[in-house]
Image: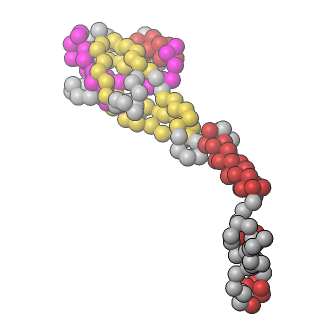
């Protein structure tokens, strides 16, 4: 049909120059179909896409499904400024509690002197701040994302006035990540 024997209908050469013997020894493809044999076929591409998709799902599951987690325990110092309307107290003490009911029971026991006041305090009170330690616990994902965080939520402050009378209150502790100071007004 007018075409030379070394050309197909597309006009591309059927065979190129002869390849050196080293290509044959290495098992590399050669000849007119070499590029077609070396390129990935559609099944290989689909298999690679499936492998990468599975790896991506495993990586996301590792982060977002809590199979593995880091648990931690810590604390921070909370600075409490105490202001008393009944006069300057002789001593001030405070303690941290996780629950409100527990804090109210401790406050009532300390006010009625059924138990001793907490040891964390300032004796004699000079008007300076009181420092209490607030416990925190939490869980983090393998990549460091915070899954949960819990801290003690209530602070009981007791002040002993010059006449021996005790006054106190229960206050909610602010989030330690946002604020580490608070002011308490005692009656």
Q: Nearer the viewer, residue 29 or 76?
A: 29
Q: Position of residue 53 (x, y in %)?
A: 68, 48
Q: Position of residue 61 (x, y in %)?
A: 66, 42
Q: Residue furthest front?
A: 2
The residue at the point 58 percent across, 42 percent down is 141
Compared with 179, 83 (above or below) is: above
Q: Residue at x 40, y 12 (%)?
A: 111
Asked whether residue 95 is in view, the answer is: no
Figure check: 66 above or below 25: above
**Image location (x, y in percent) of residue 52:** 68, 52
Image quarter of the N terminus = bottom right
Taking the magenta stretch, the answer to whether it contains residue 90 is yes
The residue located at (70%, 52%) in the rendering is 49
Q: Is residue 161 left or right of residue 115?
A: left
Residue range (magenta): 78-101
- Whether 53 is drawn above or below 44: the answer is above
């Amino acid at each position: 049909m007018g075409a030379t024997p070394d050309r197909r209908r597309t006009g591309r050469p059927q065979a190129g120059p002869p390849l050196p013997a080293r290509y044959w020894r290495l098992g590399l493809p050669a000849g007119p179909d070499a590029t077609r044999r070396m390129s990935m076929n559609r099944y290989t591409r689909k298999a690679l896409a499936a492998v990468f998709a599975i790896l991506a799902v495993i990586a996301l599951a590792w982060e977002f499904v809590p199979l593995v987690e880091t648990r931690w325990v810590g604390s921070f110092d909370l600075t409490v400024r105490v202001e008393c309307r009944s006069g300057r107290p002789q001593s001030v003490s405070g303690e941290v509690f996780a629950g409100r009911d527990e804090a109210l029971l401790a406050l009532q026991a300390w006010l009625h002197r059924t138990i001793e006041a907490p040891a964390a305090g300032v004796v004699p009170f000079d008007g300076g701040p009181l420092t209490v330690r607030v416990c925190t616990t939490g869980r983090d994902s393998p990549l460091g994302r915070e899954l949960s965080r819990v801290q003690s939520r209530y602070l009981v402050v007791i002040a002993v006035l010059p006449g021996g009378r005790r006054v106190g209150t229960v206050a909610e502790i602010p989030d330690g990540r946002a604020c580490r100071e608070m002011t308490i007004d005692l009656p």
